[in-house]
Amino acid sequence: GIQVEQSPPDLILQEGANSTLRCNFSDSVNNLQWFHQNPWGQLINLFYIPSGTKQNGRLSATTVATERYSLLYISSSQTTDSGVYFCAVTPGANSKLTFGKGITLSVRP
Amino acid sequence: NAGVMQNPRHLVRRRGQEARLRCSPMKGHSHVYWYRQLPEEGLKFMVYLQKENIIDESGMPKERFSAEFPKEGPSILRIQQVVRGDSAAYFCASSPGVGYEQYFGPGTRLTVT
């Protein structure tokens, strides 16, 4: 099946810093989503981005489908950004999401 | 527009009992997915359903687990004779079709004692 690798596995930032989270995938996809799992365990949809670039406030994402990677940018990080960030994809005509292992982000005040 | 709803949010069962987890998709969504998050193992797909049909159950354990999405009412994930290894967070997601964005519910945290 498709492989999804996220890097780095852990990230510690000082409040106000910027960061880039990476997601590599091993096959072509028809869906790519970024999620934030907050400390209460809830999965929050950040972006649906099978290709192209999107921005939402301090967050933006870019997917280069031909090169099989996606990037999530967090600018001016806040302590509330802490949690685990997941990238998930569906290959081809498939519908089930395959998740990466996640990136644990800690933002310190 | 209400999001995906799951209940109960927390469920405690003793070994050997049955667990029933419910999921109501977003309005207008007819595709439902169940995922499980085991400690230290990440999020894994279990089953994909449309109304009255199981489309893909390749991630479901072969025994004790079943899922349904009836014509009326929520989708149900049923675990019979629970064991300690079933303790996990179970998430439901819904979408309006194949390849569309999936929206997740808050999850049900199952603890087996």
Image (cartoon, coloured by chain):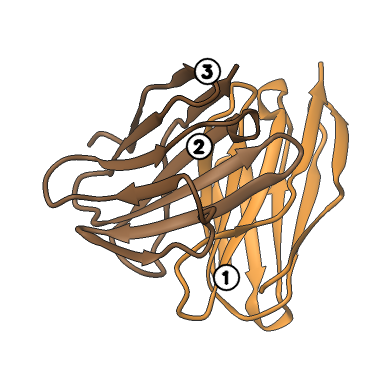
Chain colours: A orange, B brown
**Residue B92 found in image quarter:** top left
Q: Residue at x 69, y 53 (%)?
A: A72
Q: Position of residue B70 (x, y in %)?
A: 18, 50
Nearer to us of marks 2 and 1 is: 2
Res. A52 mark? 1
* Mark 2: secondary structure: strand
Quarter of the picture holding the N terminus of chain B: top left
Q: Secondary structure at mark 1?
A: strand
The chain to which mark 3 is attached is: B
Mark toward the viewer: 1 or 3: 3
Q: Amino acid at mark 3?
A: Arg
Mark closest to the chain's N terminus, 3 or 2: 3
Quickly name the residue at label 2.
B90
Q: Nearer the viewer, residue A56 or A47?
A: A47
Label 3: element kind: loop
- Residue located beneath label 3 in the image: B14
**Where is residue A91 drawn, in percent x and y?**
56, 75
User: Decide: marks 2, 1 in contact (CB < 8 A)?
Assistant: no
Q: CA distance from mark 3 to mark 2?
A: 17 Å
**10 Å crowding of disc 1: few (<14), some (14-19), many (20+):** few
In the displayed structure, A93 sits above or below A75; it is below
